[in-house]
Amino acid sequence: MKNPKTATVKTPMGQYKGLDLGGVHAFKGIRYAYPISKNQRFAAPRVIEESSKLINATRFSKVAPQPGIRIYKCGEDCLSLNIWKKANSKGSRPVFFFVHGGTYIRGSGSDALYDGRFLAETYDIVVVTINYRLGILGFLDFSSYDSHWVPNPGIHDIIAALKWTYSNIAYFGGHANNITIAGESAGGTLVSMLPVIESTHPYFSKLILFSGLPTSILSKTESQARTKSFLETLNLSAPDQISALSLKHLIASSSTFMKKSNLGSGSFQPSVDHVLISEPPISLLAKGHGKPIPMLIGSTQDELSVIEHPLLKHHWDFSPALQEGLSLENEAFIRKIQSLYNDYYGAKLGRIQFFSDILFKSAGLFYGQAASSKSPVWFYRLDYRPSRMDMTRLGAFHSSQLPLIFGNLKKGLGKAMFGLSRKLDEPKSIAGSMQEDIVRFMENGVLPWQQATPSLQESKIYNDKIQYQPMIPNKLYALLKQTDYYKRTQDHTYAEKRHQLAKKK
């Protein structure tokens, strides 16, 4: 682009020079914290100081170190955020603060899939996407080795980005007291923890979970064991050696651990750390704790169809997590549930729907129903299966809602889903319905369908025809709520109690 038009915004943190894209102004790669230095790799983010400098915000920062990305695109100067705002907007507008997914090891806020231009221009909202530390740097707990290091550095990053947004978004046309925190997949899991972290409560007013996994959180003991296993697997005697690793070797060690640990996509996870989080969020919400805010929670119908796809099942390797979870259940009871799923959906879809329900949909339901005694909660489900996805038997697969949410039907994943389609009337209509509900929710905190209760899970179903029905058929969901998995989400000490009882026997 030759001599692009620019737009400037003056804030206490500096004067930012962004891009004037016509109807939208974009500000990219804004630091919310200083770059991570080698001796600060596991420390809390260092907050940016006020400045009077002119800061270039016309290009994205490097992405957090991660496998699968060319080394020159990664960097430890990655703690940045991106902002899109309507050019001629007046007044203070709702803010969409989005945390990307990627199984805690991949992704960035600069992915074309999350480009906020369409949402900002069409609905006059302010869109914020962020980077945060991933993998080893973000979700291994080395805090017992050095008092300056923190558990869950990735969550500390998200909180720092949220605080920066709250303090500065008014200069970009956003309403600081109307920030909706949202996340998809791993990003949804991380966002689900914020309402039970009291220090974050002033900085947001609503929450949206897109296919989040608020059940996928390690205990402190499990997290420390994971860290120890990592050091042993890589033949490292102390975390100091990781601080000394080059970026290239750091990324390679992530891949090595994922292969040798046999944990796949579950190798790196957030944990109960007793610093930010005292118990898993569902357990706390069930006890009436947490910030009472409006919540919109949902999933796709065929979340785990990816495990059947030869090219995608390695990228989203949920098998270890599924097998580990099912191993804790009564085998005869699980066979009974699986048999009912096969009867309900047919043998071909029964396995996919069972795994999709027990890993993703039920996690959102457990979270939303636990919160519903204090917070207004609405559920949704995306059932739409573009013809290309039906041909590949992926259907409404994990993350397929993202192109519709952001309106990017020809970018990133949207290009793969709709790139061959000559007519986009149907997906545009469904996308419009989802976007309008999201924006209505951001503006008013209210949606025009039945709220969730501890016993009701009525959901809006987005498809070629809008319907309203339970997220999971009631007969099947009733059985899922009889699992040890469900009981552990309501009482984080349940597994330990069962272990002690077994020892006595």
Image: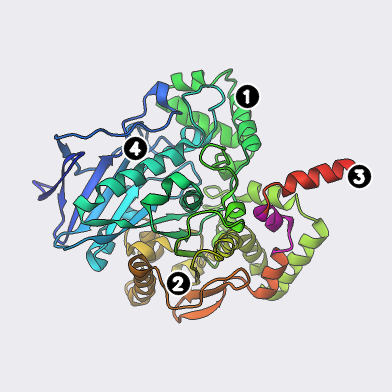
Question: Circle 2 — which element?
Answer: helix
Residue type at the position of mark 4? Leu
Horizontal and vertical percent position of residue 248: 42, 27
Residue type at the position of mark 3? Lys
Q: Look at 61% across and 71% down and name the residue there.
A: 472
Q: Is residue 152 left or right of residue 7?
A: right
Question: Circle 4 — which element?
Answer: loop
Horizontal and vertical percent position of residue 85: 22, 57
From this viewpoint, is residue 149 visible? yes
Mark 4 vs mark 1, CA separation in Å = 29 Å
Mark 1 vs mark 2, CA separation in Å = 47 Å
Disc 2 or disc 4, which is closer to the eye?
4
Horizontal and vertical percent position of residue 356: 60, 62
Whether residues under marks 4 and 1 lie with C-beta atoms below 8 angstroms apart, the answer is: no
Q: First in sequence, mark 1 or 3: give its number.
A: 1
Which label belongs to residue 79?
4
Q: First in sequence, mark 2 or 4: give its number.
A: 4
Whether residues under marks 3 and 4 lie with C-beta atoms below 8 angstroms apart, the answer is: no
Q: Look at 45% across and 21% down and name the residue there.
A: 243
Q: Look at 43% across and 27% down and name the residue there.
A: 41
Q: Which residues are magenta?
A: 481-490
For disc 1, the marked residue is: 232
Assign the magenta stretch its main secondary structure. Answer: helix
Judge by depth and name the residue closer to the eye, 286 or 327. Answer: 286
Q: First in sequence, mark 3 or 2: give its number.
A: 2
Question: Circle 1 — which element?
Answer: helix
Disc 1 or disc 3, which is closer to the eye?
3
Q: First in sequence, mark 4 or 1: give its number.
A: 4
Residue type at the position of mark 2? Ser
